Amino acid sequence: MFLMSRKIKSLGVKMVMSGEGSDEIFGGYLYFHKAPNKDEFHQETCRKIKALHLYDCLRANKATSAWGLEARVPFLDKEFINVAMAIDPESKMINKDEGRIEKWVLRRAFDDENHPYLPKHILYRQKEQFSDGVGYSWIDGLKAHAAAHVTDKMMLNASNIFPHNTPTTKEAYYYRMIFERFFPQNSARLTVPGGASVACSTAKAVEWDATWKNNLDPSGRAALGVHLSAYDAETPFDNKPSKIVESIPLMMEIPGVAIH
């Protein structure tokens, strides 16, 4: 986002619209496929929204402000949040039998047959997290670079070197080394968040799938059985909408809310 903001500003653009918050409000991350019920789904969206200032919004604000670019976040308009969070969580949940994928409500809101905003193969393609969308070679390259600089012995001693929110992967360890080199103060160290996470989940959501505890990874590919390509580089990525999507009526009825 830092590099993208630099490019945008170089084109003379001063303000951009950013989609921060939409995944948190509508349960757009791939791990939401494993939500056991609507109550858990709703509580997780609430946890994600309340933590936005620590992660996505902080990243967006710093990356854009660094280049004098103003980012506006329409999905985080308070009135919009109130309407979106009042929707029955059951209507937001992923349901493969009904052809409902992640962020289904939002996708349907932009599905206009007469004046399409986006081609359907884009509108209904699987969620790609920012870390995945820039290219899997970036993710794999970072992991390989960290592995070359962090030894197994260093990881065994990680709790003594970084007692606060001890990094559990070599990649996380490498980032902490960089961070504490620039910010050695204890006050800075205490700002580092932690906790188990898979595919951008909160620690609580990791409990939804027992296999996730052994595969804690921020990449969307960590949602095994959900991500179309997962960790298999040879698996083709199909962006075509399903036949189920094409046959669903334009109007979607949600209790108390009419969405065109």
Image (spheres, rainbow, N blue to C red):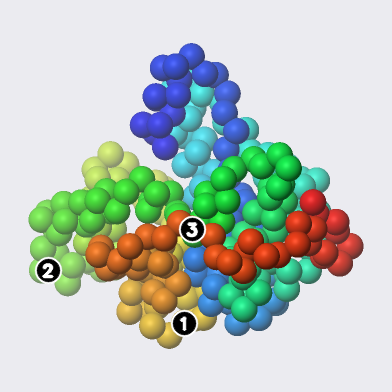
Give the CA distance from mark 1 to mark 3: 28 Å
Amino acid of disc 1: Asp
Q: Secondary structure at mark 2?
A: helix
Pair 1/3: label in front: 3
Q: Is residue 127 left or right of residue 19?
A: left
Q: Residue at x 85, y 58 (%)?
A: 257
As drawn, which residue projects farthest toward the right? 256
Residue with the mark numbered 3: 240
Which tag is nearer the camera, tag 2 or tag 1? 1
Can residue 51 be seen in this snapshot? no
What crowding class fits label 2: few (fewer than 14 Cα within 10 Å), some (14-19), or many (20 or more)? few
- The answer to whether 126 is drawn above or below residue 20 in the figure is below
In the image, residue 1 above or below residue 135: above
Q: Are marks 2 and 1 in contact (CB under 8 Å)?
A: no
Q: Position of residue 136 (x, y in %)?
A: 29, 53
Residue denoted by label 1 = 209
Between the C-alphas of marks 2 and 1, the distance is 27 Å
Residue at the image position 50 percent from the left and 66 percent from the top: 30
Near mark 1 (Cα within 10 A), the count class, few <14, some 14-19 or many ≥20, is few
Q: Decide: few, some or many residues near mark 3? Use Cα within 10 Å; few <14, some 14-19, many ≥20.
A: few
N-terminal label among 1 and 3: 1
Q: Is residue 158 visible?
A: yes
Q: Which residue is mark 2?
A: 152
Place of residue 251 in the rendered image (x, y in percent of width and height, measured from the top left): 80, 58
The spot of residue 100 in percent (x, y) is 63, 68
- Label 3 is placed on what type of residue? Lys
Front label number (3 vs 2): 3
